[in-house]
Image (cartoon, helix red, strand yellow):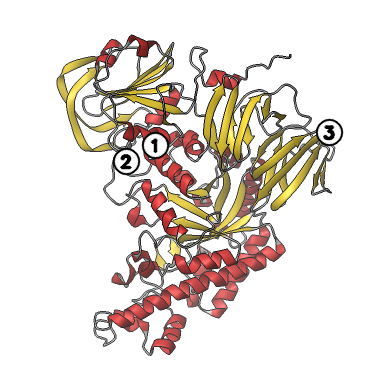
């Protein structure tokens, strides 16, 4: 019997050449498991059902244990304890008030605990790396080192009841100390605004995005609404670079904002606020899409934009009205253009602008029923506008059938006041999205950005009341500075971000991040880990069990078999595993053809002496990156692509839908 070589992956999940029974569990000793369930759970590590776990969290009362110190694991210490003392930590007599923290990864990041903690400082052994310290007294708060048995990570205090209060970069520290995180999502979405990035290297960006788990990039289309040589060349090269790196590119539109030039060229079509001013609100300059001439002109611009570039989809984002302050701020309240005023007056018998005139008998304070009627009219108008523009995109789809369509819509289920503030009524919009075979990308409003990750599960529950099919629902996480008092950081980063992404991925079919340039560089490595909901265990030293609802990227080096069969979809460091439960073991012989990357949902892959048969599904085109040369590609039995001598093309765009593709050596 031929012996199977042990894959190099096993070395990555072991310390001192000792394999763990499972690579994704932890246990606690004299410590509250609650916060650690959230911290470690955000990267797929769950509380163990037994004492056999590769991660051990020891609280302040944890006893010194020779067996515990000698075991193979990552040991996490909360505060000063007999166990910490046995490892060389000592407690000082002077107390320190811990509140403002400096992390060595990003010293400029302001990290502030909501409540200060006063306690004696601790002297850390000299061979420990200090990851974070108190700002004023320089007392260490987070430190660690690798050991012969694994690693030790020490925290000055407990992490806090929710796990996010004190140590935003605790997971990064654990990874630095050797924590293995073998599963990654292959399907994050992200938003990209090229307005200030025209000098950025597109190949560098695309490689970084793909490494961060991004499969779809939503690119601001308003910068390229009218032809411009420099901007168009940049966008075309960006799309090509993304395609080379298995990333689809969607045109991100923000109607009623069209473009700066369209606003300047057409003052006659500018939207008006309730005080009669042009609706130039924040960065958006809103046009009156209720005007037939304006609507036709904008539709022509949109169709030209979609035709000029090699888009894979379109995101019609935030297609409703301003502002979150609603009718309470007439200077920002829209729409109040002449077309809307005439139409509403025909229906209701009065000019809606009079609602904002204190001297009018129809003012909102004197006629609350009239305001209610206009707000309902406005919500119906927003839904009609969404339906009209999805029809425009249906026309574009007739020319490019592979275009995927997304409607980004702010949530009004979790925050009902949004309906009156913006005219956004998701209960009206969802059937429209379903009728147009599109995706609803739910955006949580700024008013709830200070709430925790649990809100995504609650939001998903609200949407289950509207539809039984969750597959066309996605969630948008805004990674921006928040206006509320939030701790420990103004922007979601580190553990808080990972908890949000993981909960969102567990609740919705897809997760989008707004926006890619607002993400902290120290978070990028763990984004796809947090977005994965795969469960991984290690039944034996040379086998992994992977159970996931979607295609998952798993760390693996060397040849691989899945469920006892040769598997061809892998690169030098990872393997792509289809949805469902599968078993990975070291392979014996290399397949005739290898596929280095793929961004669709893999259904199956079969290896033959001549090549590979791949079955997949994809809402838009799918991109395969070849890992070895092929002579031809067939789709559903028909020739699709043939190699041209001298053309080293490795990234191939495949058709949208469900298909069987044959790659021949």
Q: Which residue is drawn at 27% across and 35% down?
A: 160
Q: Residue at x 49, y 71 (%)?
A: 383
User: Picture coordinates of residue 467 (x, y %)?
Assistant: 50, 61
Left or right: 553 in relation to 163? right
Q: Secondary structure beneath disc 1?
A: helix
- Marks 1/2 in contact by CB < 8 Å: the verdict is yes
**Up-down: is 578 above or below 335?**
above
| In this rendering, the label closer to the viewer, 3 or 2 | 3
- Marks 1/3 in contact by CB < 8 Å: the verdict is no
Q: Is residue 8 visible?
A: yes
- The residue that disc 2 covers is 489
User: Label 3: few (<14), some or many (≥20) within 10 Å?
Assistant: some
| In this rendering, the label closer to the viewer, 1 or 3 | 3
Residue furthest out toward the left: 94
Q: Secondary structure beneath disc 2?
A: loop
Earlier residue among tags 3 and 2: 2
Locate the C terminus and report the quarter of the image it occupies: top right
User: Picture coordinates of residue 420 (x, y %)?
Assistant: 36, 70
The label on residue 245 is none
């Amino acid at each position: 019997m031929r012996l199977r070589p042990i894959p190099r992956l096993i070395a990555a999940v072991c310390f001192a050449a000792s394999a763990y029974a499972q690579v994704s569990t932890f246990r606690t000793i004299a410590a509250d498991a609650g916060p650690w369930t959230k911290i470690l759970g955000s990267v797929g590590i769950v509380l163990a059902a037994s004492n056999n776990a590769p991660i051990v969290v020891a609280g302040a009362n944890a006893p010194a244990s020779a067996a515990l110190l000698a075991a193979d694991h990552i040991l996490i210490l909360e505060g000063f304890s007999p166990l910490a003392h046995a490892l060389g930590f000592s407690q000082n007599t002077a107390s320190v008030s811990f509140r403002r923290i400096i992390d060595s990864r990003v010293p400029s990041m302001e990290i502030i605990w909501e409540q200060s903690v006063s306690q004696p400082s601790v002297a850390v052994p000299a061979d420990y790396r200090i990851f974070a310290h108190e700002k004023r007294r320089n007392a260490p708060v987070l430190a660690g080192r690798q050991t012969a048995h694994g690693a030790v990570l020490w925290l000055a205090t407990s992490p806090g009841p929710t796990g996010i209060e004190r140590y935003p970069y605790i997971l990064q520290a654990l990874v630095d100390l050797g924590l293995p995180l073998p599963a990654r999502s292959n399907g994050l979405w992200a938003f990209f605004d090229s307005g200030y990035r025209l000098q950025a290297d597109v190949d560098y960006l695309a490689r970084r995005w793909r490494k961060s788990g991004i499969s779809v990039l939503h690119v601001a289309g308003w910068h390229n609404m009218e032809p411009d040589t420099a901007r168009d060349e940049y966008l075309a090269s960006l799309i090509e670079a993304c395609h080379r790196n298995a990333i689809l590119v969607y045109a991100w539109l923000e109607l009623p904002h069209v473009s700066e030039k369209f606003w300047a060229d057409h003052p006659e079509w500018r939207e008006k606020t309730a005080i009669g001013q042009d609706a130039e609100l924040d960065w958006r300059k809103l046009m009156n899409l209720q005007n037939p001439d304006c609507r036709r002109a904008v539709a022509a611009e949109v169709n030209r934009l979609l035709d000029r570039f090699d888009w894979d989809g379109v995101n019609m984002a935030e297609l409703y009205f301003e502002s979150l302050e609603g009718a309470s701020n007439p200077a920002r309240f829209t729409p109040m253009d002449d077309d809307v005023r005439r139409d509403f007056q025909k229906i209701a018998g009065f000019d809606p602008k009079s609602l904002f005139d204190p001297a009018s008998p129809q003012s909102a304070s004197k006629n609350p029923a009239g305001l209610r009627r206009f707000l309902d009219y406005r919500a119906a108008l927003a839904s009609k506008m969404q339906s009209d523009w999805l029809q425009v995109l249906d026309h574009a789809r007739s020319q490019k059938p592979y275009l995927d369509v997304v409607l980004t819509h702010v949530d009004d289920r979790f925050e009902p006041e949004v309906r009156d503030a913006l005219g956004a009524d998701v209960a009206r919009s969802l059937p429209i999205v379903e009728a147009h075979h599109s995706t609803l990308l739910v955006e949580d409003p700024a008013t709830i950005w200070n709430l925790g990750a649990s809100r995504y599960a609650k939001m998903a529950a609200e949407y289950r009341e509207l539809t039984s099919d969750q597959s066309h629902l996605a969630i948008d996480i805004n990674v921006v500075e928040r206006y509320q008092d939030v701790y420990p950081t103004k922007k979601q980063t580190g553990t808080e971000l990972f908890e949000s992404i993981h909960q969102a991925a567990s609740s919705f079919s897809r997760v989008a991040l707004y926006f890619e340039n607002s993400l902290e560089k120290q978070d990028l490595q763990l984004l796809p880990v947090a977005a994965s909901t795969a469960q991984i265990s290690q039944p034996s030293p040379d086998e992994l069990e992977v159970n996931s609802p979607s295609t998952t990227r798993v760390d693996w080096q060397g040849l691989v078999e899945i469920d006892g069969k040769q598997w061809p979809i892998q690169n030098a460091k990872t393997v792509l595993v289809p949805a469902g439960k599968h078993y990975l073991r070291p392979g014996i012989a290399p397949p005739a053809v290898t596929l280095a990357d793929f961004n669709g949902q893999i259904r199956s892959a079969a290896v033959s002496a001549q090549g590979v048969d791949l079955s997949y599904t994809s809402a838009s085109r799918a991109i395969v990156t070849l890992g070895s040369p092929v002579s031809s590609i067939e789709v559903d039995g028909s020739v699709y692509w043939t190699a041209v001598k001298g053309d080293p093309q490795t990234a191939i765009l495949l058709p949208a839908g469900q298909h069987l593709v044959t790659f021949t050596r």
